[in-house]
Image (tube, rainbow, N blue to C red):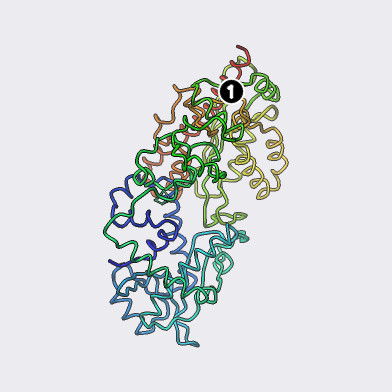
């Protein structure tokens, strides 16, 4: 029974969740990882391997339990070791990179993270301090001479020009001082975590997420909180931001959304959600829907991008995690009542897709009329980035953005509230409620994360030629449904104002 760094970090976030991970793996792994989570793991591995090139020629420990080989390499003062593993009586770690420093006669530690240096910095720096401190304490207790403690992550300001410049792409931040400042605190926390996590009996009672909105729950919430209805007060729109209201409900033993007291002060959106859940009747504001639809001009292009967020910039002009637009679908309605046309484009070559995508946009999207999207900030940001990277086309792309109309707005603005929306405005909730016959469930690819990963596998050579053909077709059908869904939802709104 050894406490790994991973379990310690999960414990810091939630003790109960870490306990379930260790003692009830059947529950912890009940839900398969989402495509998004799988993507995070793959990116982490890719970045780890790339970071080794900062210190080339090292020796890799490939077995996570080869403590003996690690010890031998350390005793020989091997200049660079990748993934060395260590254990004490209670704890276990695998470090990313250790580099022998001849001047200090100590090993410097490099912890590699695939996160962006600009992202949520304060919170992440605290987390990384605890992460590195756990490793430092284990190394120190084993009597290993440890020098500097570095965090290596992706430099958000890096823009690729030509070959990837690793020394500019990766940051090298000295965490030594802040780790040493927190050593005693982390040591004590490790001791408490060990006792908590290796107790035989399961910690009982509701878990603390009972007072967090649904987005804050982990996959074991249902297991740890039996009896809470599937559609509960945790699903009230943005309730996670009003902790006091949620606490009030929980303290009064109210879990079912239908039992929320009438006099609880809620936002209009929250009240509407509960009201339609009770009545099972829609709320429709015809006037507002009409005003919205009046802003749309023919020819209408219903438009959607698929993209891949590459942590390691693959092409010139890209920074870490910039989205690569590789595909789009557009349904075109020239005039009311005319036949709907569908156009599509996907790039599966190994060059920068930017120019191919832009030229296809120029060819396939009408030069005038409205461009209807769902959640406009995504498509508009892609157009802006494409324009920045390709200044010759900036005018064209900014004209596209000037014509964007967001079909999510009537739902966001509560012009149409349906009990099946459950307080959400994503197309994945609106479509099945309004057009149940059109379903993503019939498709091989059913959501954006899988589409991203599939394209990445195509362009990185993970599929045979035959699989590429099949998966390309799957991607096309998925993106087509995204724009067809908008056409059908638009049609529903039009019928409402005509009725
Ligand atoms: S739902 Fe929240 S409190 Fe409960 S186990 Fe998961 S993370 Fe922990």
Decide which of 326, 478 is in the foreground and name it. 478
**As drawn, which residue projects farthest toward the top?**
499
Decide which of 36, 257 is in the foreground and name it. 257
The picture quadrant where one finds residue 393 is: top right
Q: Quadrant of the N terminus?
A: bottom left
Give how far across and how far down residue 334 sits, in percent. 64, 21
Q: Residue at x 59, y 15 (%)?
A: 495
Q: Residue at x 33, y 53 (%)?
A: 20
Give how far across and how far down residue 482 sits, in percent. 51, 31
Residue on which disc 1 sits: 490
Decide which of 23, 259 is in the foreground and name it. 259
Give how far across and how far down residue 211 sits, in percent. 48, 46
**As drawn, which residue projects farthest toward the front?**
252
Up/down of 129 relative to 99, above or below: above
Q: Quadrant of the C terminus?
A: top right
The picture quadrant where one finds residue 440 is: top left
Residue 33 visible in the picture: yes
Secondary structure of the residue carrying numbered label 1: helix
Up/down of 418 relative to 143, above or below: above
Decide which of 98, 276 is in the foreground and name it. 276
Q: Is residue 213 left or right of residue 74?
A: right
Residue 461 visible in the picture: no
Give how far across and how far down residue 479 sits, in percent. 50, 34
Q: Residue at x 62, y 39 (%)?
A: 359
């Amino acid at each position: 029974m050894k406490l790994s760094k991973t379990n310690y970090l999960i414990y810091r976030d939630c003790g109960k969740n870490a306990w379930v991970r260790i003692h009830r793996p059947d529950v912890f792994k009940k839900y398969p990882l989402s495509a998004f989570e799988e993507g995070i793991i793959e990116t982490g591995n890719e970045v780890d391997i790339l970071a080794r090139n900062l210190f080339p020629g090292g020796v890799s420990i490939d077995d996570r339990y080869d403590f003996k080989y690690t010890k031998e390499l350390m005793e020989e003062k091997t200049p660079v070791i990748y993934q060395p593993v260590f254990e004490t009586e209670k704890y276990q770690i695998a470090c990313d990179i250790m580099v022998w420093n001849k001047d200090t006669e100590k090993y410097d530690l490099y912890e590699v993270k695939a996160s962006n240096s600009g992202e949520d910095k304060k919170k992440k720096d605290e987390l990384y301090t605890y992460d590195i401190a756990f490793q430092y304490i284990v190394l120190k207790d084993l009597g290993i001479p440890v020098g500097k403690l570095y965090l290596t992550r992706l430099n958000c300001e890096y823009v690729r020009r030509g070959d990837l410049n690793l020394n500019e792409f990766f940051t090298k931040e000295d965490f030594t001082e802040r780790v040493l400042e927190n050593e005693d605190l982390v040591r004590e926390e490790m001791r408490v975590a060990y006792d908590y996590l290796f107790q035989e009996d399961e910690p009982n009672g509701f878990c603390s997420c009972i007072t967090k909105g649904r987005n804050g729950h982990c996959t074991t919430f249902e297991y740890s909180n039996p009896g809470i209805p599937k559609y509960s007060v945790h699903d009230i729109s943005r309730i996670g931001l009003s902790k006091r209201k949620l606490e009030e409900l929980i303290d009064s033993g109210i879990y079912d959304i239908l039992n929320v007291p009438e006099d609880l002060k809620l936002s209009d959106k929250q009240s509407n959600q509960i009201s339609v859940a009770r009545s099972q009747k829609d709320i429709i504001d015809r006037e507002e829907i009409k005003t919205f639809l009046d802003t749309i001009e023919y020819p209408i292009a219903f438009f959607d991008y698929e993209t891949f967020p590459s942590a390691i910039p693959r092409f010139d002009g890209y920074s870490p995690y910039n989205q690569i637009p590789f595909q789009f679908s557009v349904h075109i309605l020239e005039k009311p009542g005319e036949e709907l046309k569908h156009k599509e484009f996907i790039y599966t070559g190994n060059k920068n897709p930017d120019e191919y995508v832009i030229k296809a946009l120029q060819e396939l999207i009408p030069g005038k009329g409205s461009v209807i999207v769902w959640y406009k900030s995504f498509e508009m940001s892609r157009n802006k980035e494409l324009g920045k990277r390709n200044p010759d086309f900036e005018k064209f792309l900014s004209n596209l953005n000037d014509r964007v109309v967001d079909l999510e707005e009537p739902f966001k603005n509560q012009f149409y509230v349906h009990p099946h929306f459950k307080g959400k405005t994503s197309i994945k909730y609106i479509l099945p409620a309004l057009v149940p016959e059109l379903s993503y469930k019939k498709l091989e690819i059913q959501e954006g994360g899988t589409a991203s990963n599939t394209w990445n596998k195509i362009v990185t050579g993970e599929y045979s030629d035959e699989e590429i053909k099949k998966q390309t077709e799957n991607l096309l059908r998925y993106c087509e449904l995204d724009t067809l869904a908008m056409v059908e939802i638009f049609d529903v709104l039009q019928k409402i104002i005509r009725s």
